[in-house]
Structure formats: C-alpha cells, structure tokens
Amino acid sequence: MSMKDEHGRNERLDMRDEYFAGMTWGWTGVRGTWAAPEAERSMTLMAERLGVNWTAISFGALQDHPQATEIKFEEEPTVTDDEVRGAIRQAKSLGLKVVLKPVVNCRNGTWRAHINFFDIDVPCEPKWSDWFASYTRFMLHYARIAEEMGADMLCIGCEMVQTDRREREWRQLIADVREVYSGPITYNCDKYQENQVAWWDAVDIISSSGYYPIDDWEAQLDRIEPTVRKFGKPFFFMEAGCPSREGSPYVPNDWGLEGAPSEQAQADWYAAAFAACDARPWVQGFMLWDWPPKLYAPEDAAGNDDYCMYAKKAEPIVRDYYGKRLKQAVSGQPEAR
C-alpha cells in the first residue's frame, strides 16, 4: 500500500522488485452499478478466487466522437466519484494494491486509438490543444481522487495510439499530474506500440496491452525487450487476456470474433502467455482483462465467451501461476521448472 511521509503525501512504491499479480476490475460499469451489492461480491470473489495482489480499477468517460474536444466525465454514464472512492476502499480492505485507470472512449463507438486531429492548428477545425486541455482536466480530477484515497499507481491513458506522437503534450500532462498525485505513474500503450512511445522516460513504469497471438509471444517479447532496456523502467502488461471462444487465441484483441464458446481456447492462450513471460524476468506481471462488476452465474460459464475467466478452465491456471510468482517474489528465488 501507499505510505504517507511526514507531510502526509503518498510515498512512491519501489516498483523494481514488485510483481503485479493483478486483474482489471469494473470495466463496463456505468453510473450506479458499482454501488450495487453485486459489485462488492464481484470484487471479493476476484480476490478470493484468483489470489491477486493488485487490481486495476478501470472505468470509462465519453467524448462524442474521435474529433470531439470535450470529455464529459462528470455526467452519465461515468461512475460517480463516490463509486470510485468506494471501489478503491473495498480493494484496500481486501489487501489489494490499486492502480486507478480512467479511460476515454467515444460515444459513437469509434475506438479511442483513433482520436486524432491535424498536426498543425487550422482555424475552424478541432485542435489538439483543445482536446488536451479537456483531457488534462479529466485526468487531474481522478489524480486528485487517487491521491486522496492513497491509490498505489495512476494510469494516465490507455491505447491512445494517435495521441502517442504528441510528446510535448504528454510530458506536460505528466508534469501537471505530478503536482497533485505523488504516487507512481504509468501509461498503457496499445499492443505493438511499445517501441513507438518516445516519452517513456517521463513515467515511472512502462505498461502495454498484451493481446498477442498464442503462437507469437516469443517474437513480440523479443521486440519489446530493447525498449524496456533502453529506458530502464519496470514493465508489466496493464492489459492481457483472451475471450473463451474458438479462434480467439490467434486474435485475442478481437472481442467481436465469431466463434463458439470454448473454455479450452482461453485456457490454452493463458498457458502459452504465462510460459513465454515466465522466461523473461523483466516482465513483472499483468493486470489481466477483465473481471466485470456483475458476474454471470457459475453454471453459465461454459456458455460465456467473453474475457472474464470466472468459473472457467483458465481460472485455476491464473490462480496457480500467480501463486507461484508471488511465492518466488517473497523467496527471491525462481522456482525450478
């Protein structure tokens, strides 16, 4: 957990020896759902069944479309500030460390990676400067809540591919966030983009979305490693997962792929991902995707084809792997394989 210094500020955790046995919680939560009894039960079951030590508490706010410049985080469907505080409070009561992860989406359904504007300001056209002003207001709002509640990390963006090139604006945002939040900061770049971000030196931890094909993990880890070495920062996968659906292990980022439900397909993907990452000590863990605030019934698990592994074959794979890695972290010794 975050500790307080003599001035009452949150001290930054030393992340270099941290193992992130984490799960993303709360996604698709809309206003009012996080305050429901089902949400409290969901988080409790996540902690009990997976043995996680971290959770990424993640929620969305909307802008109307990818060229809109106003992020409407103070209105529905975004969860309320009290719901955010309550989720952090519960996670801490369960002994979990928390990364707070506010995310921007587009109301018209366009993926946030396509939020984009002209590189040079043009009169009467939407501008990067207007968008970053709104995004900064959005992020500072939750940075203050993260500081107030002692969140152990703040994720300042997720998979915003077209924004990544705006290095000056991101560096200014990070500086502004550090004025109000004293804990460690990360940015969740998209898959295949780890070596495209020029400003990793400005954050404390590098993180990305690890939706890599089941047969391509080694090549992708080979590609990512030089970036991690170059910047000398801790690294973990802020997202990683696979739907329990036939065909999904080869395109785990395609949540709309057509295919029959398959617990085995999901289990196979997790086994492969963990095996590949286990051989790379610089991979310090995962915030897997995802555990919703309202769970399906266990008896419906076999017919559920989404990312959540509750009561599916992948669940014990995650639990056993996390248990092994956390045991190693305590002993300081790798377990013989």
Image (cartoon, helix red, strand yellow):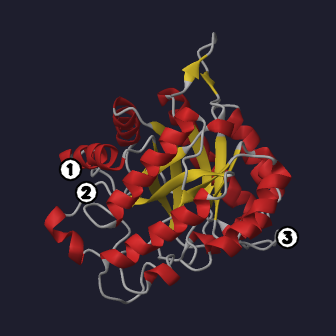
Mark 2, residues whose alpha carbon is within 10 Å: few (<14), some, or many (≥20)? many
Where on the picture, by quarter, is residue 130? bottom right
Question: Residue 40, position in %: x, y?
Answer: 25, 43
The residue drawn where x is 28% and y is 66% is: 312
Q: Quadrant of residue 219?
A: bottom right
Disc 3 versus disc 1: nearer the observer: 1
Residue in the image at 76% along x and 61% along y? 225
Question: Which disc, if any, is residue 120?
Answer: 3
For badge 1, the amino acid type reads Glu
Furthest residue toward top? 6
Q: Is residue 211 visible?
A: yes
Secondary structure under badge 1? helix
Q: Is residue 77 above or below residue 250?
A: above
Q: Position of residue 281 (x, y in %)?
A: 67, 51
* C-alpha distance separating marks 2 and 1: 6 Å
Q: Which residue is mark 1?
A: 38
How packed mark 3 is, by other alpha carbons closer than 10 Å (few <14, some 14-19, many 20 or more), is few
Q: Which amino acid, mark 2?
A: Lys
Sequence-wise first label, 2 or 3? 3
Q: Nearer the viewer, residue 308 or 114?
A: 308
Q: Residues within 10 Å of mark 1 (few under 14, many from 20)?
A: some
Q: Which mark is residue 294?
A: 2
Q: Residue furthest left?
A: 299
> Which residue type does callout 3 highlight?
Ile
